[in-house]
Image: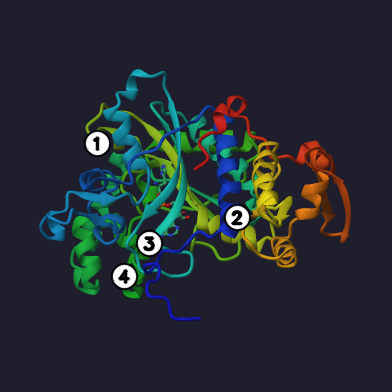
Amino acid sequence: MAEPLFRTPKGTHDVLPQDHQYMTYIKKAVRHRARQAGYKRIDTPMFENRGVFERGIGAHTDIVEKELFLVKGAKSGDADDAEFALRPEFTAGICRSYVEQGMQQLPQPVELYAIGQCFRHDRPQKGRFRQFHQFDLEVIGLKDPSLDAQLIYVVTKILSDLRIKDRLTLQLNNIGSAENRQAFADALKDFFIGKERQLPEEDARRLKTNPMRVLDSKNEDTQIVLKNAPKLEQFLSEESRQYHATLLEYLEALGVESVPNPGLVRGLDYYNQTVFEFWDASTGAQNAVGGGGRYDGLVELLGGKSTPGVGFAGGMERMIWHMKEAGVSIPNKDQVDVFVAQLGPEAKKQCLTLVAELREKGVHTLGALGEASLKSQMRLADKFEAKYALLLGKMEVKEGTIILRDMRAGKQKQIKFDQAIPQVTKLLGEQNLDTYVLRDQIGDVDED
Ligand code: HAM
């Protein structure tokens, strides 16, 4: 094969039909569970004013500092002048929308879900892409541990629908209120006074801009110094501890198991209180399939009234990877039921309407409407793995008949032309016909 002229950009990939089966399956599970729990679907733009992310996620987080895809028009100046950025996640955009659309007027909490592409200009590696898909659930407007518990429960339901829940562990932590975190950050700064020189340049800089991020440092020296540093746990208020205890009680009542993880802080600045991630039970922190938490300050940061919120996002590529590893098979709905083959101008005309009518009845139909010989058309029917073939040659046209061939059994019979549709639909079985009535499926129209 010739070398292609263009390839997908680094860190991106085509979602080919065989992967779409998994994508669609996940989307269906998400839509189903979200609807059951009263969530409504929202779509926000794929790009936003970069300030939405800089303010919301935090200017000194990796996602904003290193991974934002900046967007500018062909006519504008250099990248630093770019007004917009591709969304690295949904939460900040959804909260921008909550404020802009006056959703505080709606009955609270407002429960929203979104499914779509996100973009992070990270170094691509296994399970980490520059364009990937998330599904996202947000509960905005009320604060109560029961909401955190219910959200986590819905997520576990989705994961068990996808048959990957047993491969994952729920890592759970409480990182306290904004004040608790501030007190901890101050204590960390104090602790490092006089020790700055033991830190690599990047960690010394983090200590100034976002001290909690020093905890995530991959540097061994930093980690050794950190062993004696104050711990976030020591700064949690009684209220935060109580909040977490109640959440654990509710999770237990719902039968959700979790692993306490005091080291879990998450890479986005907007969190407070509850944070959680779903980890691969065998490999741990690397490539979490999803994560979330409470963000009571975010809406206000984006210009709204003080409004609490809690949410979760799952990485769909990572979930698909787990589904494949677990051998989860997806029902294939792209099968070809009938292949219509014809020869001669009159046959071709009749087949054109026959194909249209079969499709209307819910039969997945392909029609070879080219000029190839019947033999090569039948070879094609075989390649498409059609269950049945209908053959209309010049003779059959004259006689008002058609040949119906069972491709698997390799048997065929001549039937009356007007019997073709009733016979085929009977053979396939009423329940297997792909009829789609929009009117009955109003909630299902958001297929994307
Ligand atoms: P996050 O932990 O940054 O949280 O991302 C959620 C999930 O998206 C990750 O656990 C992972 O599965 C997937 N993901 C993230 N980056 C990549 C990547 N480069 N390639 C492939 N998959 C990736 C959030 O985005 C928060 N907005 C979650 C949230 C919602 N918090 C509150 N509400």
In the image, what residue type sits under mark 3? Arg
Q: Which residue is mark 3?
A: 130
Q: Which residue is mark 2?
A: 168
One can see residue 141 in this view: yes
**Label whose residue precedes the other's in the sequence (4 or 2):** 2
The answer to the question of whether label 3 and label 2 lie on touching residues, with beta carbons closer than 8 A, is no
**Label whose residue precedes the other's in the sequence (3 or 1):** 3
> What count of labels does the image hold?
4
Q: Is residue 290 above or below residue 193?
A: above
Q: Toward the viewer: 36 or 63?
A: 36
Circle 4 packing at 10 Å, graded few (<14), some (14-19), many (20+), is many
The answer to whether 238 appears left or right of 408 in the picture is left
In the image, what residue type sits under mark 2? Leu
Mark 1 near ligand 1 (CB under 8 Å)?
no
Q: Residue at x 71, y 57 (%)?
A: 343
Q: Is residue 209 above or below residue 7?
A: above
Cα separation, mark 2 vs mark 1, equals 34 Å
In the image, what residue type sits under mark 4? Thr
The answer to the question of whether label 3 and label 1 lie on touching residues, with beta carbons closer than 8 A, is no
In the image, what residue type sits under mark 1? Leu
The answer to whether 229 appears left or right of 159 in the picture is left
Q: Which residue is mark 1?
A: 302
